[in-house]
Amino acid sequence: MAKNTHQQLLRELPSVDQLLQTPMVTDMVANYGRELTTTALRQSLETTRTAILQGHSITPTPDLLLKAAVHWLEAFLTPTLQPVINATGVIIHTNLGRAPLSQAARQAIEAAARSYSALEYDVTAGERGSRSVHAAQLLQHITGAEAALVVNNNAAAVLLMLTTLCRGREVIISRGQLVEIGGGFRIPDVMAQSGAKLVEVGTTNRTHVHDYQRAINERTAAILVVHHSNYKIVGFTSEPSLADLATLAHTYDLPLLYDQGSGALLDVAPFGLEAEPTVLAGLQAGADMVAFSGDKLLGGPQAGILVGRADLVAQCRQQPLARAIRADKLCLAGLAATLTHYLTGQALVAIPVWRMIARPMGEIEADAQRWASELRQQGVLATTGDGRSTVGGGSLPGTDLPTKLVVIEQTDAAGLAARLRGGKVPVIGRIQDGRYLVDPRTVLPEQVDNLIHSLVNCSHHQG
Ligand SMILES: *Cc1c(COP(=O)(O)O)cnc(C)c1O
């Protein structure tokens, strides 16, 4: 008997064409186009048919089918690259898009996107210009380097540097620096891709200047130093300083190449973090070329930056590979605006990652207390507790910042975390010892209301 009912319900299902004739579809077609609307209607009919076959007694009215179709359309068209709330306390979170941009950088990107721009046009001369001038002059000013070049990301910058300056020849590197950065960036692989031959010297924990010196021969193209960006070797360790390696390299008329990685232009030590070598320090120590990312500690858009000797940068710029990995106008606009903050002394207030690093403990604590009390007022079991924030993003390994957390007691912290991730603006937090933790340090001011709202909602609806 049940089967007969199913058959009957299935027979009642209208066709796609019938649905397309209904007056209510007009709006859908206007909003989403005929093709996508048709797809959505098919999807809706299919889902309903399956539900009926599974024994659900649904009366497949056109109204119901259209509602389901609109639902499908909305879900399908929701951008997957959506904003999230970073409550992890990891400031440069590679999986969450690294550095959020300053307001000026966002505005510069919007302006470059909106209209034509002088991307490769010299407005004074009225002739073709070069895209590499835009951020380069600012970079030269900030770092004191003779020249600068911006490409797509730092992996590309290192590849370009090695391809241009070392292809078919040898590059000397310490065994302790044959690193893998997150996301599969492995120095030996990049080296192989560039056509340069890797010459490993020293041991994992100790390498001396004489190890490098012994490896130098007529095939040597450069000495490469790679910053330990995401790991730390502790204990019985030693590595020559950049300055010592620069002296050695220059004695043999070789360039010293330095993959600095993070793009730190300011010293982090005043904020209680272990010193991270800055780009400036690399150049001052004698590196002939320094490579770094735009979206780590520099705090700008994704980019790879080479600064250093004018002749070396010029060679890199002229390499055909440079064209394949060039930076786009949006990146250059955002990068230039971000760099301006350093020039005007505004980096600590204007650039979000630096604001987060420099944020006084008192402010974080006040936030944590205010949020916890708001949550308690709304019936959520919330307290505050001590914790640590990290800089992340392959910088400053083994060093972190004290912070104050909002601690949420829930019997099922994993369930709460899943509901928070499933919200309209997903919240990404941490779980420790069965408690859900929110670090105010990495929550952007404009996301606070949303965060509290989600925490209340998701804590109350268990399941
Ligand atoms: C992050 C990093 C890279 C890779 O940079 P991307 O911008 O992610 O391509 C390379 N080298 C070092 C030392 C790094 O820290």
Image (cartoon, rainbow, N blue to C red):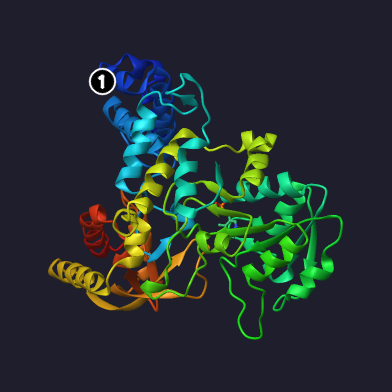
Where does the image place residue 438, in percent across and percent down from the top left?
31, 68
Q: Is residue 377 above or below residue 219?
A: below
Q: Is residue 227 visible?
A: yes
Work out whether residue 50 or residue 280 is closer to the camera in this orientation and state it.
280
Work out whether residue 114 or residue 249 is closer to the camera in this orientation and state it.
249
Q: As drawn, is 383 to the left or to the right of 241?
A: left
Ligand 1 position by quadrant: bottom right
Q: Which residue lies furthest to the right in this view?
A: 218
Q: Residue furthest bottom?
A: 236
Residue at numbered disc 1: 24
Q: As drawn, is 82 to the left or to the right of 161?
A: left
Q: Is residue 1 visible?
A: no
Q: Quadrant of residue 310?
A: top right
Q: Which residue is depicted at the point 53% across and 30% down? A: 130
Where does the image place residue 170, in percent across and percent down from the top left?
81, 56
Work out whether residue 327 or residue 15 is closer to the camera in this orientation and state it.
327
Name the element at disc 1: loop
Q: In which quarter of the image is residue 318?
A: top right
Q: As drawn, is 343 to the left or to the right of 307?
A: left
Q: As drawn, is 175 to the left or to the right of 152?
A: right
Q: Which residue is depicted at the point 25% across and 20% down? A: 24
Q: Which residue is depicted at the point 36% across and 60% down? A: 354
